[in-house]
Image (cartoon, rainbow, N blue to C red):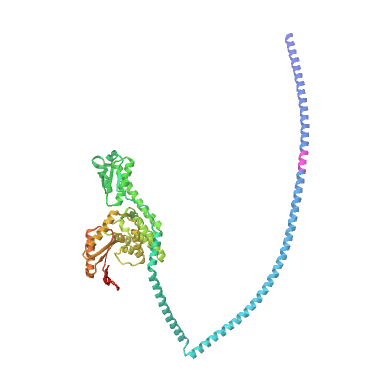
Amino acid sequence: MIETIIVAVTLVIGVLGGFLVRRQKHQREVDEATRQAAALRESARKDAEQQATKYLTEAKAKIQADRQSTEAELADQQTETENRQRRTEQRQVTLKQMEERLNQRQAAIEETQSVLNDDQTHLNETKSQARQLFVDRQNEVAKRAELTTSEAKDHIRLETARNLEQEEDVTVRELTDNAEASADKAARNLIIESIQRGPVDWPREHAEHSVLVPTNETKSKLIGRDGQHIRLLESLTGTDLVFDPEQPNLLLISTHDPIRRETTRIAIESLLASRKITAAAIEKQVQTAQNEVLKDLRQTGERTVSMLKIGFMHPDFMKIIGRLKFRTSYGQNVLNHSIEVAQMAGVMAAELGMDVRVAKRAGLLHDIGKAIDHEIEGTHVELGVALAKAYGEDPIVVNAIASHHGDVEVTSPISILVAIADAVSGSRPGARSESVEEYINRLHSLEKIANDQKGVQESYAIQAGREIRIVVQPKVLDDKASEELTENVKNQIENELTYPGKIKVTTIRELRAVEYVGDKPGKKKKKKRA
């Protein structure tokens, strides 16, 4: 019991002691916190005083700077106001001076106007007096001449007309004589000018008639089993395909249609390049080649029409023009020839003051019939006329096409220009190709036919074999016999020779009698025949 009490008392004493110790510790912490708070308050007060001093100083400085800037701006504004005031005063002075000058000018104008009015009045009076004097003079003249004014006018008019007619006749005769005298020279100069400005040397394009097959294996594929592939190509393209006996790998394309030939060549070359030669591939390549050739025809026609600047043309007609690219005449590309003719005809038309566009159009289309003459019966002139009429071409163009070989009468000067340009383009050196041997043989044949005739003294084939001139013996043949000889030579040339275009046969029968007077009797009389 006593031990329990002692323990309880000890516990109470321990609790009280711990409470007192904790209280003292807490009091020390409170005192320390109070000191720290006082120190913080003092530090904050000092910082606040420093910041306040700093801000106050900055504010004063800013206020001083603003005051100085404001005072400077006010001074500037004051100066500007004074300057404006001075300028305003100067302008007012200037306006007053201008007003005074305007008033002076207005007074001068009014004075001048008054003088002009007086002069106008005096002028009107003078004109009235002049009219009256003119009337009086006419009356006096009519009275003395015993003619009225209308009769005098008629007399003067008739006399003037008679004089003008005489002068006109003299002038017309003079101009006509000058034109006739200089016509040949002007024509030569005009043709030379057109040749120099028109044709250009085109590189000669040879139409390919064959395709080289590279290997025997490719050749076997192209022929196919039992010739199926090559027969399919022939049926699709409408051509004959034959290998050259001398060159087994050279495939010849035989057809009269240059479009088909070009289509076949493109298709075969595409097959050889692809190395896939089957029936389906052949049909596809042939169709592709046909589309490519048709596209090329249209583009060629469009480029030609655009280059010559001849205006609108039907798209189908331009395709026909493009077909001339694959047509040749004596080795000359017909499209290039047509372009040359158009350019030369245009130059000559421009120099003569004619319609250049119509002349170029006629020159381009003059041989258009050659594009289809291998497909349709008829000459290229007839087919060209039909095409031009079908596509609504100008009648001048139609006549130029019809008359450029002299088949019909010329109705327009442009037709003559086209015929001249056609002759120049076809006959100029290098335009057309022909073997020298064939050319010489044809000339010899022409001269031989003429020389074999009875009564022929000599003959000459000229103009590259387009004309033969026969000189006959005047005592052997008379005029009628000369005409018969000409007819015989013409018929024999038609029957025995192959000739390009037309050949002109001219027979010359002329007798010249020459006599000499002198000491040598042997030369008193001498006849020279030519």
**Compared with residue 376, is residue 184 higher up or lower down, i.e. above or below?**
below
- The kind of secondary structure the magenta stretch mainly shows is helix
Residue 162 spot, x, y in % from top left:
42, 81
Asked which quadrant contains residue 60, the reply is top right
Residue 87 percent across, percent down from the top left: 72, 61
The C terminus, quarter of image: bottom left
Residue 310 visible at all: no
Front one among 43 and 523: 523
Counting from the top left corner in percent of width and height, residue 380 is at: 29, 59
Task: Give the percent coordinates (x, y) of residue 133.
Answer: 55, 86
The residue drawn where x is 45% and y is 86% is 151
Image position of 498 with respect to 171: above or below: above
Q: How many marks?
A: 0
Q: Judge whether residue 56 is colored magenta.
A: yes
User: Does the stretch in magenta take in 514?
Assistant: no
Residue at the extreme front of the image, as rendered: 519
Q: Is residue 516 left or right of residue 14?
A: left
Left or right: where does residue 61 sit relative to residue 254?
A: right
Residue range highlighted in magenta: 52-60
Q: Is residue 484 visible?
A: yes
Q: Quadrant of the N terminus?
A: top right
Q: Nearer the viewer, residue 101 or 262?
A: 262
Position of 297 compared to 475: left or right?
Answer: right
Q: Is residue 115 above or below residue 34?
A: below
Q: Nearer the viewer, residue 4 or 451?
A: 451
Residue 59 falls in image quadrant:
top right
